[in-house]
Amino acid sequence: MEQIKEQTTHMPRIGEPAPAFEAVTTHGKLKLEDFKGSWLILFSHPADFTPVCTTEFIAFSEIHPELQKRGVELLGLSVDSVSSHIAWARNVEEKTKVKIPFPIIADLNKEVSLAYGMIHPGQSKTETVRCVFIIDPNQIIRTILYYPLTTGRNMDEILRIIDALQTTDNNAVATPANWRPGDKVVVPPPNTQEMAEEGLKQGYECTDWYLCKKKL
Amino acid sequence: MACISPDGKPTESGAKMLRALQAGLGSPEEVASKAGLPLFRVRSGLRELTEAGLAKQRDDKYELSENGAEMIK
């Protein structure tokens, strides 16, 4: 317990390099660096053979083709064994006809869970909460989501975040609230008066000098 | 081991990677493209095949070892 308390005091943060790991998975031993060059969604679930997690795994499998189109790999994690993961994945396929196409880390010694702050002792001292780490091709953490044990994640939001991050990276813009691909994007606010005046002449849709949107 | 079976023989994905190296030296990216496997699987698989003596690493590229070539004959 002391070890968990101590190690969860460092929580990875957005903009930091993702903590390196080498872990046993359902697809063999994988290192974080194996994913270099791809976007990666590392997500944890509390336990195999549990109802909410099963619905999430089906949902993650269903968005897998959309993620692949965007150059994103998925990597699951819980503190169960590889045998348990394999048995659960086979059970899900048998009962629902959905094949789990991505690897799942068997983090029995909690090495990865602790490095990523996935165990929240206030929720559970032994299980990981529902975390999502979106890691970019340079292995920098770009988004962190935490959900409690009782709330299944929203796949639309995860896809939307990927689309928003990739749009930002490709176009040097930001995305407004509830943005969806195809919507107008936010032009970065000007840093000087000259840039503010020039911005107003660009034909952007401006509420004022600090909030301008444009179509891509 | 994802690429090597308990009997020491390459699994289906391991054999795909070895076959992708039949033409000579290849980078993980080239092997992934030829084998039709995700790059992360290939990076980890080539590590395993090298440890098992079925492939050899030369700088950032890989090639078949004699044992590896024998396995896919």
Image (tube, coloured by chain):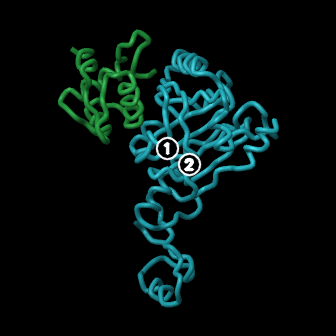
Chain colours: A cyan, B green
Q: Are marks 2 and 1 in contact (CB under 8 Å)?
A: yes
* Vertical arrangement, residue B9 with respect to residue A157, above or below: above
Give the residue number, with chain letter if any, for mark 1: A40
**Residue A120 lies in what quarter of the image?**
top right
In the rendering, at what x and y percent does residue A82 appear?
57, 21
Name which residue lies at 65% across and 37% down.
A113
Are there few (<14), some (14-19), or many (20+) residues within 10 Å of tag 1? many
In the rendering, at what x and y percent does residue A101 appear?
46, 28
The disc numbered 2 marks a residue on which chain?
Answer: A
Dot 1 amino acid type: Leu
Give the residue number, with chain letter if any, for mark 2: A18
The circle drawn on residue A17 is none
Q: Between residues A88 and A6, which one lies in front from this camera angle?
A: A6
* Vertical arrangement, residue A13 with respect to residue A199, above or below: above
Dot 2 amino acid type: Ala
Name which residue lies at 75% across and 49% down.
A9
Taking the image as shown, residue A211 lies to the left or right of residue A52, namely: left
Total numbered badges shown on the rendered structure: 2
Under circle 1, the secondary element is strand
The disc numbered 1 marks a residue on which chain?
Answer: A
Taking the image as shown, residue A167 lies to the left or right of residue B73, namely: right
* Vertical arrangement, residue A195 with respect to residue B64, above or below: below
Q: Between residues A30 and A59, which one lies in front from this camera angle?
A: A30
In the rendering, at what x and y percent does residue A151 appear?
70, 38
